[in-house]
Image (cartoon, rainbow, N blue to C red):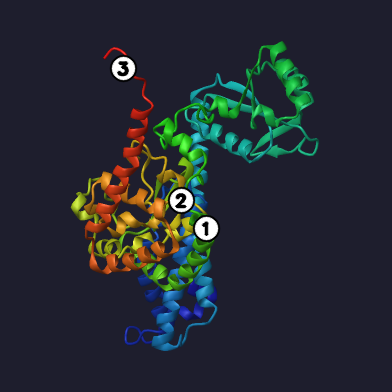
Amino acid sequence: MTLALRDVDLLAWPNMPFDLPGPYLFVFVTIAFAIPALLIFRAGDAIQNTFSVPDLYAICAVIALTISASALLLFMLTRLDGIPRSTPIIYSLVLGAGLAGGRAFSRLVSHERARVSAKRNITDLRKVILVGTDQFAWLVIKLIESQSPATTQIMSVLDEGPSATGRSLNGVHVAGRVGDLGRIVDEYALHGVTIEAVWLSMEPEQLDTASLRFITDECDRRGIALKSVAQALELMPKASARRAQALPTVVAREAAADPAAGLPRYFGAKRVIDIVASVILMVLLAPVWLLVAALVLFDVGRPLHFWQQRVGRSGRHFFIYKFRTYHAPYDAKGHVVPGAERLSPIGRLIRKMRLDEIPQLLNVLAGEMSLIGPRPLLPADQPANPGLRLAVRPGISGWAQVNGGNLVTSEEKDALDEYYIDNASLGLDLKIAVMTMMFVFGGERRGIAALSRAMAARRGRKAPARGLAEQHSPPNYRR
């Protein structure tokens, strides 16, 4: 199709089959690159009738990889002899239009069938007036229309401002302003339509006070249910009184409330060092970053990054990022992949060299982590009293990692982290940085001397507390 659009004479093959003209060589090369590009970016994974913006990004990536790789190879082989320079551009437009257009057409057909089927199945629908013309209201209308079988129908939309009146929001007419609610309900009643609910696309406190009072009075007087869309769709935020998983004890909450209390003064300057060092490391490691990303894309595929929620300073939850090194637990047919087969040799090498930790430089730059500090733990893995470790930012590497890592117990690791927090300094951070490089190339080994000092410091920290309790305990008068 590309060749025909560019010049139909390009399809002529006078000496068939003795030679291969440049245009046909272009056809075969682009096909050879397009197929693996579709597999690499998983453009065929999406359900065809749910075409969305992320699917469009995948299509653009397929086109870019196919065109750039094909043009580079053909230029090296034939200097693009016989191929008009505009052909790759036309090819990209044709390929993009075919991939995107086919998916968009499939989505339109599927949604139209679902809409007709839903309206055919149920005629006694809940009639609702929606207040608000924001992006959330637009999505709510689309969501209600996509339900099958349908239970609700958005009859019209109201808005506080006059500029939206007479327009439409996702195909639903904006009938008027908030003050027109009573008139519009009465008008629907004349046509035999009973409005059963009024939904607010925003939370009530975000609505103008006078408008909210008017809507409330009108709904109460007419017996119409008034609720926000968040209430109607069960999207309310979690209760604030719920006990956070990050801080399993009251002691931890009290300790995390003042993170700077009792810490070495070095932590005051540590944030500046983290920012400068992380920027320098990101620049220096940019080629390695790109290489690892390419290896992960080739080995595991998209997405490139693995995220996990961890607990950071003051008990705040954040997402830690790593390069993916494990294949999915299920294959394309839904069969379970054994755990031993999920980690490939490439993934094993990346994990051994700790290259999967590179994306955490972004966490450092964002202030969620530090270059050196206690490793962030999952909420379920927090120790009984995590107050001290949650007083500082977690680190990419730390004293516990370079003195045993996975070879030390949870208690020993916690003691090493506490020792670091009590003795943090620029010299200790530099020592950990050097030991991290040795750890990457030499493997894990238990630091016996460091473990002994850390465990002794932990025992010493607990001993005075016991002595103080005994000193101030009431006398035993019954003795």
Instruction: Choose top left, top right, bottom left or bottom right for residue 245.
Output: top left
Q: Is residue 42 left or right of residue 94?
A: left
Q: Secondary structure at mark 2?
A: loop
Residue 61 in the image: above or below residue 83: above
Q: Earlier in the sequence, mark 3 or mark 2?
A: 2
State the CA–CA distance, disc 3 to disc 2.
45 Å
Mark 1 and mark 2 residues within 8 Å of each other at the beta carbon: yes
Res. 393 mark: 2
Q: Is residue 423 left or right of residue 460?
A: right
Q: Secondary structure at mark 1?
A: helix
State the CA–CA distance, disc 1 to disc 2.
9 Å
Mark in the foreground, 3 or 1: 3
Residue 203 screen position, x and y as percent: 64, 30
In the picture of the structure, the residue carrying the numbered disc 3 is: 476
Is disc 3 surrounded by few (<14), some (14 to 19) or many (20+) residues within 10 Å?
A: few
User: Which residue appears at 64% of the width and 32% of the height?
Assistant: 201
State the CA–CA distance, disc 3 to disc 1.
52 Å
Q: Is residue 166 left or right of residue 65?
A: right
Q: Among all residues in the image, which is located at the extreme right?
A: 162
Q: Earlier in the sequence, mark 1 or mark 2?
A: 1
Q: Is residue 18 left or right of residue 200?
A: left
Q: Secondary structure at mark 3?
A: loop
Task: Specify the amino acid type for callout 1.
Answer: Arg
Task: Specify the amino acid type for callout 2.
Answer: Arg
- Res 447 seen here: no
Mark 3 and mark 1 residues within 8 Å of each other at the beta carbon: no
Residue 350 in the image: above or below residue 416: below
Mark 3 and mark 2 residues within 8 Å of each other at the beta carbon: no
Instruction: Choose top left, top right, bottom left or bottom right for residue 463.
Output: top left
